[in-house]
Image (cartoon, rainbow, N blue to C red):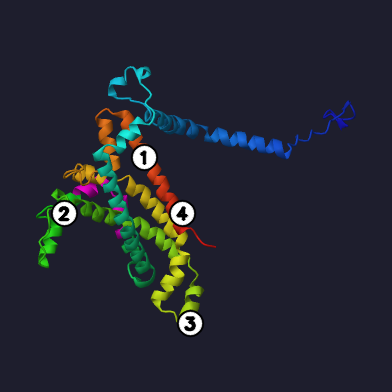
Amino acid sequence: MVTTETGGVDSFRAVRPPRAPERLGPAARRRRQSVIAWLFALPFVLIFGFFMLVPLFSSFVMSFTDFTSKDVRNPLGVGFVGLDQFMALFGNQQFLHSLLNTGYFVIVGIPLTMAVGLALAVALNNGITRFRSAFRVGFYTPVVTSIVAVAVVWRFILQPDGLLNLVLGWVGIAGPDWLNSTEWSMPAMIMMAVWRNMGTLMIIFLAGLQNIPVDVLEAAQVDGANAWQRFIRITLPILRPTLLLGAVLLSVGFLQFFEEPFVMTKGGPLDSTLSVSYFTFNQFGYGKYGLASAASYVLFVVIALLSLIQFRALRSKD
């Protein structure tokens, strides 16, 4: 009961206590949180679905058809050909040659890049103490530089009278015409790719090295293990997950290499630097959309298989 402001007891009224907020059960609270989360994620889901999932599904369907540039105006007239596009791919000598080129690039380039990146990471972690940050920035700079700009610079370096042959001439070696030689054009691509990607692996491996317990290394040193034994028996086994990450990231990029030959050699000479991605690009340019889609999914399967092999080979053995 309350009294009015006019003084005395003019009137009284009953005041109801405020209602307690309705409490939601655990299941209802989870549903509400899920709805709110999906509302926040909805813009991304719509954009991803429209610009990624729809093209992926369309290209997958297209790989089983004879879709060409002539069928753009009448897509319903496209014929279903089953696995004919894939069979045509493996009967195409140029595609098989591009597969061999890509395999050469990956088999040589990935181990070499990982070895250089690991060596730089070990040097920065143990050997180099002064100007360590400057070295990190210097080695990582090629990663953030435009691949087109990098390729143009390397194109001048690899000319017959370029910087590389000039340096080789100082030690009495006559350098080849790197980009116009069927023998040396792919090693030139690999050399540039190693230089450009070693910074990424250096940062990844350096983070892994800095997480290795110091007391484990010190205990091994007290037991008489030298630096090489500590590296082989302790550092590398602990780095297995980090090595796996670097290998998978690098293999995905190397299997899709395209910009380097596109800018530097146009796939030549005599298709010696033609990659699967470049072959796919050319087929789209020729208007053979079904064949190009099939080539894209062959590359996807190769990437998935290589990643699976790397996971089995480098996974931690706990």
Residue 198: percent from left, percent from top: 32, 57
Disc 2 marks which amino acid?
Ile
Q: Is residue 144 magenta?
A: yes
The answer to whether 311 appears left or right of 69 in the picture is: right
Badge 3 local density, few (<14 within 10 Å), some, or many (20+)? few
Of badges 4 and 2, nearer the viewer stands 4
How far apart marks 2 and 3 lie (CA) works out to 48 Å
**Mark 1, residue position:** 298
* In this picture, residue 38 sits left or right of residue 30: left
The disc, 2 or 3, on the residue closer to the chain's N-terminal end is: 2
Task: Name the disc covering residue 222, or none.
Answer: 3
3D distance between C-alphas at marks 1 and 4: 20 Å
Callouts 2 and 3 close, C-beta under 8 Å: no
- Element carrying mark 3: helix
Q: Which residue is mark 2?
A: 157
**Residues shaded magenta:** 137-152
